[in-house]
Image (spheres, grey):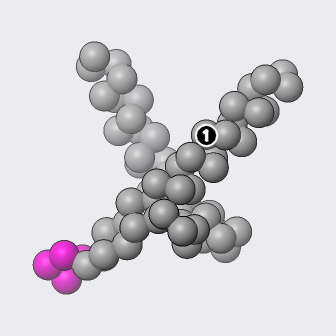
C-alpha cells in the first residue's frame, strides 16, 4: 500500500514538473482536464491527459 502511494506521489511530482513542457504539445488542455482557482492559486487535474499518456505508455510497453 505504501509502495503504491509513493509511486503515485512521485508520478504526480514528475507530471507537475513537466507540465509546462507538456502544455506545448496540448496536454493539460484536453477536454476532461480540470483547471480551477482556489485561494488565489491555480490547480489543475489533468484527467484526460493522464489517460492519454497511460495509453501511449501501454502501447510502447507492448511494442517492447
Mark 1 — residue?
Answer: 54
Residue 8 percent coordinates (x, y)? 38, 35
Residue 44 percent coordinates (x, y)? 38, 66
Left-right relation of 20 to 2: right
Toward the left, the furthest residue is 39
The residue at 53%/49% (across/down) is 50
Q: Secondary structure at mark 1?
A: helix
The residue at 56%/46% (across/down) is 51
- Confirm whether residue 5 shows in the render: yes
Q: Nearer the viewer, residue 41 or 54?
A: 54
57 to 1, vertically: above or below: below
Q: Quadrant of residue 34?
A: bottom left
Q: Residues within 10 Å of mark 1 (few under 14, many from 20)?
A: few
Q: Quadrant of the N terminus?
A: top left
Left-right relation of 39 to 14: left
The residue at 41%/46% (across/down) is 12
Q: Nearer the viewer, residue 62 or 18?
A: 62
Toward the front, the furthest residue is 31
Residue 52 percent coordinates (x, y)? 63, 49
- Which span is picked out in magenta? 38-42
58 to 55, vertically: above or below: above
Residue 27 percent coordinates (x, y)? 61, 64
Q: Quadrant of the C terminus?
A: top right
Q: Quadrant of residue 30?
A: bottom right
Left-right relation of 25 to 54: right
25 to 59, vertically: above or below: below
User: Main SS type for the magenta part?
Assistant: strand
Toward the right, the furthest residue is 63
Amino acid at each position: 500500500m505504501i509502495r503504491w502511494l509513493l509511486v503515485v506521489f512521485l508520478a504526480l511530482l514528475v507530471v507537475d514538473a513537466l507540465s509546462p513542457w507538456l502544455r506545448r504539445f496540448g496536454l493539460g488542455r484536453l477536454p476532461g482536464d480540470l483547471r480551477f482557482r482556489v485561494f488565489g492559486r491555480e490547480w489543475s487535474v489533468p484527467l484526460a491527459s493522464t489517460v492519454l499518456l497511460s495509453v501511449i505508455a501501454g502501447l510502447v510497453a507492448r511494442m517492447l
